[in-house]
């Protein structure tokens, strides 16, 4: 309902502006200087502004409304009104005004609202207006009035008198548009038209709809601040202030035979670790610490594609020993069969982590020793077994925003519980060691778009968060509502105490039991 109210409010605003510009276009028709055959008026200024400020849909509507009213008999054209006005030589220019305004709107919708683009849109509009007017005028005079006009006479009049004067309107409309856009839409005028895409997408999601890939791609261009604010509104609507906090323990480090191009644990990139399993004491200490700190889950992560039967049995014993603990046990053990997942579930495991890493199309550029389809099999098997599935990916590994959007859509299709968003931290010796780091704004935009696509899941900034200037606080104001706290497999993370202070300051409430309910009190600062 909130989305419908927002959509209705935005539509009323646009319709009000449409009516206002229809009135301005009417007034402009009567503020004129009668020169030669066609009177020079201010109509071009207002029709051009209608297209630029209102966009294709509403700008075109304002011109259509003006034409319909005039042809219906309202005396708002330069020489009256009524259906008979179509026989007036100037009617072609009115058609040109409508077409030109729509074309100007299209030009401005394709890029930044810079002065060169605004002026160019006006000039193209001007060409359309005079082309339509001249063609209509010539055809009418020849075939209806039987008085063919000298084309040279008409063109000279246009080029020497009207075009120079209307070019001034192009400059004026560009200046006015640049100043009015922030007032009308209250944000960067360079991306004004994209705000309508943002509102439409936000309303659709808040109303329970799902964005298409095309709709999600449009969010790449909207103002970042507005996008993050809308993403946070979506998060509050579907997830309230619930927060999911987990830690990871490195249960088996290095010795990995895979060739994931971002991973420092791969033996093919020089990792010397032999892949020794964590001891029972180390696991118990890590779990007890996570439980004492009140974390929602602790995930034990092992390197490698498949665990040996011996290692799986050993770890299963570790998990069984803590069955019934307040902190959920999560596992990340590479590719797992349904039988193995069922065995882990019997030992008290409630969550499974397996990142898809990238979209199906892009995955092959990151890894060749296993496939995206194999990862999907593990994710689906865990879902069938009734486990909560944590699956996300890595960004900054050469993929485009479109690739990330495809990944988010795949995760939505799989119905995952939590989506980790890892930011590449280039490691020496890996193929991506010289990858250009993503800007913070790019990371924020990615998280916000993920929230639009995945409105009711835990979006979890993970690796790379510690490298951000505010430990990722802006991400939690722009759609994210979960995190991995503490250290990672091959990198330092944010201390639990720091995270708890930040999340408390932001007003989040920790979920603290395996059924997904919440505490009654906020996190203490």
Image (cartoon, rainbow, N blue to C red):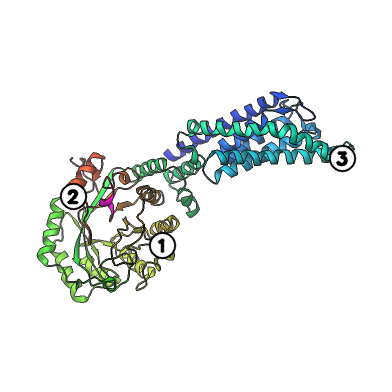
Q: Residue most toward the right?
A: 146
367 displayed left or right of 110: left
Residue carrying label 1: 359
State the image coordinates of residue 228 (x, y, percent, origin top left). Answer: 38, 43
Q: Quadrant of residue 348?
A: bottom left
Q: Nearer the viewer, mark 2 or mark 3?
A: 3
**Quadrant for the N terminus in the image:** top left
Position above or below: 196 against 392:
above
> Which residue in the structure is indicated by mark 3?
142
Mark 1 or 3, which is nearer the eye? 3
- Quadrant placement of the C terminus: top left
Tell me the number on the disc at residue 76.
none
The number of discs equals: 3
Residue at the spot 28% in from the left edge and 68% down from the top edge: 334
Residue 2 lies in the magenta stretch: no
Which residue lies under the disc numbered 2? 496
Answer with mark 1 or mark 3, whichever residue precedes in sequence. 3
Task: Kindly indicate whether the residue at mark 3 contacts the one at mark 1 (C-beta within 8 angstroms).
Answer: no
The mark nearer the N terminus, 2 or 3, is 3
Q: Which residues are magenta?
A: 464-469
| Closer to the camera in the image, 18 or 53 | 53
- Mark 3, other Cα within 10 Å: few <14 / some 14–19 / many ≥20: few
Cα–Cα gap, marks 1 and 3: 62 Å
**Labels 2 and 1: the sequence-earlier one:** 1
- Could you tell me if residue 1 is visible in this image? no
């Amino acid at each position: 309902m909130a989305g419908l109210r927002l959509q209705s409010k935005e539509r009323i605003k646009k319709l009000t502006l449409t009516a206002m510009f229809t009135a301005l276009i009417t007034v402009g028709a009567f503020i004129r200087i009668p020169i030669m055959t066609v009177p020079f008026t201010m109509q071009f200024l207002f029709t051009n502004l209608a297209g630029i400020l209102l966009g294709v849909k509403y700008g075109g509507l304002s011109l259509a409304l003006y034409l319909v009213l005039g042809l219906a008999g309202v005396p708002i054209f330069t020489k009256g009104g009524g259906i008979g006005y179509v026989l007036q030589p100037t009617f072609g220019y009115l058609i040109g005004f409508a077409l030109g305004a729509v074309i100007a709107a299209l030009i401005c919708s394709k890029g930044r609202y810079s002065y060169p683009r605004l002026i160019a849109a006006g000039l193209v509009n001007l060409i359309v207006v005079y082309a339509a007017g001249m063609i209509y005028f010539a055809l009418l005079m020849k075939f209806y009035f039987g008085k063919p006009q000298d084309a040279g006479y008409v063109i000279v009049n246009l080029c020497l008198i009207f075009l120079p004067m209307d070019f001034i309107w192009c400059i004026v409309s560009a200046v006015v548009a640049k100043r009015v856009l922030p007032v009308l839409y209250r944000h960067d005028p360079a991306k004004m038209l994209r705000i309508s895409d943002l509102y439409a997408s936000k309303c659709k999601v808040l109303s329970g709809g799902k964005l298409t890939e095309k709709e999600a791609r449009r969010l790449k261009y909207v103002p970042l601040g507005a996008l993050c604010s809308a993403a946070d509104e979506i998060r509050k609507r579907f997830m309230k202030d619930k927060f999911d906090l987990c830690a990871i323990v490195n249960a088996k480090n290095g010795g990995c035979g895979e060739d994931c191009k971002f991973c420092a644990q791969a033996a093919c990139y020089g990792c010397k670790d032999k892949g020794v399993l964590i001891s029972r004491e180390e696991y118990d200490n890590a779990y007890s610490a996570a439980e004492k700190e009140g974390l929602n889950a602790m995930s034990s992560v092992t390197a490698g594609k498949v665990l040996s039967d011996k290692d799986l049995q050993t770890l299963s014993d570790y998990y069984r020993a803590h069955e019934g603990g307040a902190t959920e046990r999560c596992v990340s053990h590479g590719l797992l069969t349904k039988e193995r997942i069922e065995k882990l579930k019997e030992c008290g495991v409630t969550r499974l982590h397996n990142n898809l890493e990238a979209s199906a199309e892009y995955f092959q550029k990151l890894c060749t020793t296993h496939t995206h389809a194999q990862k999907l099999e593990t994710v689906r098997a865990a879902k069938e077994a009734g486990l909560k599935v944590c699956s996300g990916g890595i960004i900054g590994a050469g993929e485009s925003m479109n690739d990330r959007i495809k990944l988010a859509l795949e995760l939505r299709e799989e119905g995952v519980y939590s989506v980790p968003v890892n930011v590449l931290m280039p490691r020496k010796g890996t193929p991506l060691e010289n990858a250009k780091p993503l800007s913070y704004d790019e990371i924020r935009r990615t998280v916000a778009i993920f929230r639009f696509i995945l409105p009711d899941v835990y979006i979890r900034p993970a690796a790379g968060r510690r490298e951000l200037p505010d430990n990722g606080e802006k991400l939690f104001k722009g759609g994210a509502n979960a995190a991995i706290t503490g250290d990672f497999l091959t990198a330092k993370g944010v201390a639990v105490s720091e995270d708890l202070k930040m999340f408390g300051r932001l007003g989040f409430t920790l979920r603290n039991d395996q059924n997904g309910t919440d505490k009654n009190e906020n996190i203490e600062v």
